[in-house]
Structures are given as C-alpha cells and as structure tokens.
Image (tube, helix red, strand yellow):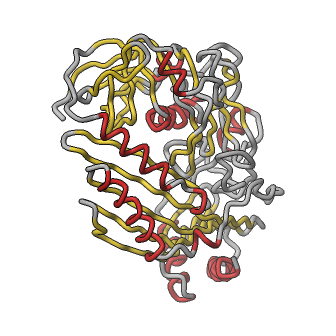
Amino acid sequence: MKEHQKICGKIFSSAGRRPVEALISSAEFSLTRFADNVISQNVSKISTDVSIRILEGRRMAKVSTNQTDAAGLKRTVEKALWMLKFQKEDRHLLGLPKPLPVPPAGEKLYFENTAGFSPEDRAKKINETVKKTKGAGQTAYGTLDNGWSRTTVANSAGVFASHLETSATFSLTTRRGDGFGWAEELQNDVGKIDFEGVAAAAVEKAGKAVRPREIKPGKYTVILEPAAVAEMLMFMNIYGFGGRFYLEGQSFMSGKMGQKVLNEKITIEDDSLAGPCAGMPFDFEGMPRKKVVLVADGIARGVVHDRKTGLKMKTPSTGHSLPQPNTYGPIPVNVVFKKGNTEFKRMLENTREGILVTQFHYVNILKPVTLEMTGMTRNGTYFIHNGEIAYPVKNLRFTESIVGAFNRVEEAGDRLCISPSWFGKMAVPALKIQDFNFSSATQF
C-alpha cells in the first residue's frame, strides 16, 4: 500500500491544483498450463497499471500508464493535460467525490500460502491429477493459476481506499475418446481447493460422455449445473441489475420494481462485505459498497447505482461504479443466487425425462431487455430417463430468454459454487428448469 501512496503523491503533485483521480492496480499472477497429461507452459507476470483522470470544469481526460517512476508519471499527467484542451464539455460530468467511510472487508481474502504458491507447488498438484486421469484411461488438459492483486482508488478531494486479496483457480478438462468432462474450482485460499474432487468430477463426466447420441432439438426439462447457471446470470447482472440500463428502460426490471419478475424460488443479492462472494468493499470511485437485494422471492427489489445513476434516481450510490467513464454504468460484481433445498441427486431422481448440462460456451446476447441468449452446451451433456443418466448426447445450441427460463425454475440446488464474473465473482446453485429451448444440434 505504501508504494501506491507514493504513486498517488507523485500524480497529485504533477497535476497541481486540478481535480485528479488515480486508479492503481498491482498484481502478481502465475499460471501453469498442461495438455496431453504433461505440463506445457509456465508463466508469471508482475505488473502495476495506473489510470489517471483529470477534470477541468465540464471537461475530462483519462490516460493510462505502467511507468510508475516520477518522470513517467509526470509525462502521463502532462499528456492528460494536453488532451484536456481538446475535450468537449459534458454537462452530465460529475466532480470528484469526497471521501466516505469504507467498511472493512467482512471476510479474510488475502492468504500468504496462495500468494506464495510456487511453480513446484502447481506442478505437484497437476502431476497428482494426471495420475488419476491416466488411471481412468483419460487425458488431462487445463490450468492452475494463483496470485494476488491490490487495487487503490484515490483522488485529490481526499478519497483513498485500498484493497488486497489473493485468488487461485484450478480448471480441468478430461477426455476419453470422444467424451469430454470438465470441472473447476475458484478460491481465495488455494488450500481450500479440492483438487481430488475436481479431478473425480471431470473423470466421471468424461467416462459417461463417450459415444454421444444425437437428439432432436426442442423444449426439454433441463438440469443446469452451477457453471451453466453462472453463464446466464452474468448477462443478467450486466443488463438486468444495473442502474443505467434500468433508467433507460433497457432492463427486464424497468418499471416493475415491487412486482414479480422471476420465479418465487429465486432470491439474488449483491454482497461484497460478507458471504461466499465477499470482495473489494469500495467501488472504482472509492465509494463504499452496500449490500443490495436485487430480487427477493421472485420480486424485483433493487438495482445497483453509481453516483450518476443514483443522482438521477434521487438515491445514494450503492457503491457499484465501474472505472469512469464507461458505457455500461454500474453493475453488481459480488452476486449471490440464494441456494434452494434440493440435493443434486434428488433433483436428478425427480426428473422423468430431461437433459443434464455441465457447461455453456460461445454465449451471446440477442435481446437485452428479455435477456434472450444463444450458446452451446459443452463438456458433458446427458439425457436423463427415469431419474438416471441414460446416455450422453451431442452438444446442442440453445436459444432462450433468461427471464423466461428463470420464471420456469422447478427446483434449486442446496449447494453454491463460485464462478468468476466481470470484476468479481458469483455464487450459484444448480437449477432444474422446465421447457428449456434447444434450437438446433451442433456439429461437435
């Protein structure tokens, strides 16, 4: 943090009395990649990136650099001042915020063992995994990464907020002939990753995915595992729960606050201060983040705000600004989809006929208001008959409204899994959904 304080001092000194904001991100990230059961790549990166935003009246200029010595920072500030002369006035531009008390992070998010997890440590875990996949007659592919990051937001009006955390992710794909399986786990503490569990899950899926059959497109009952649910929820977070989209009438919740918008089994919150998705307790303007209930028992309860959308709604910022300026407005980044009370095994047993989906990929939004999306299944898609996995099926393309699908939820799993998201993470359960639309078969 001291190094970030020094950088801020140099920036403010070079800017003189002009309003200036500094966003500093330092990180050390290391990754080991493996394919065909052998380690194929090992990389490590240490970086510090600085974004400087200078205001003058209704004009603003923003520049970035990775040169943090005094001369480099001075040149960057001078570049911003030169750019400032050519900027058009923005009557909606807000001045820099004054400091507000930022609550301490509610969870421990920095772990020395994760920051110091070495290439040898990663190689050991990967080799243990490869032994298991070889023993099952399968081939392993994937990555194991770890690192730390520090984010600091400061401005000349007195804001200074800094956050430090670690993270580690183990992602594994296994292959047996034409059958693929996948599993992944993300943790702040690498010691909490269940490497054996990840390997066992991927191996089991690949073993059951051999010789997939083709089935007709149509509407099926589906059981979506958490990774597939997270892919859908990420788009809902961006286009559905942000203050800007809400104000512009682009959100499925626009004009429906207090009304039922999703199935009554669904409660979704954003909480950076406690729980499974705890994270940075301030936003990218240094404003304190607040817990926001987005949907409660299917009822629209709130959206997140930065200072700009909060001003328009005559409500305080909830602390969800992205780096300014941006085209998205505020979005939730520490989202928890509340778990249900159905064990995954029971969810399967309760299904007479349906499709089990491990993961989606190549997902794109088609209609932002209804959140209609299209994408494909991947790494383990199976047909369910009389409560059991009957056989694997070839990958399918889906075209479906998230809002519609989340209104047809029949059961929610009793266990949350963590998935990465924009600037944060999500905790989601498995879901059983009726009449999920698979629009076509794929060629792979």
Q: Nearer the viewer, residue 443 or 355?
A: 355
| In this picture, residue 400 sits left or right of residue 21 | left
Q: Nearer the viewer, residue 154 or 438?
A: 438
| In this picture, residue 201 sits left or right of residue 430 | left
Q: Where is residue 171 shown, x and y percent of the image? A: 41, 53
Residue 312 position (above or below residue 258): below
* Residue 372, quarter of the rendered image: top left
> Most extreme residue toward the front, as rendered?
135
Quadrant housing the N terminus: bottom right
> Most extreme residue toward the right, as rendered?
101
Quadrant housing the C terminus: top left
Residue 433 position (above or below residue 429): above
Q: Where is residue 8 shown, x and y percent of the image? A: 66, 76
Q: How many marks?
A: 0
Q: Residue at x 64, y 47 (%)?
A: 277
Q: Where is residue 237 shown, x and y percent of the image? A: 55, 36
Q: Residue at x 61, y 55 (%)?
A: 58
> Most extreme residue toward the left, as rendered?
443
* Residue 401, quarter of the rendered image: top left
Q: Nearer the viewer, residue 352 or 57?
A: 352
Q: Where is residue 371 shown, x and y percent of the image? A: 45, 25
| In this picture, residue 29 sits left or right of residue 136 | right
* Residue 383, quarter of the rendered image: top left
Q: Residue at x 42, y 75 (%)?
A: 44
Residue 73 position (above or below residue 200): below
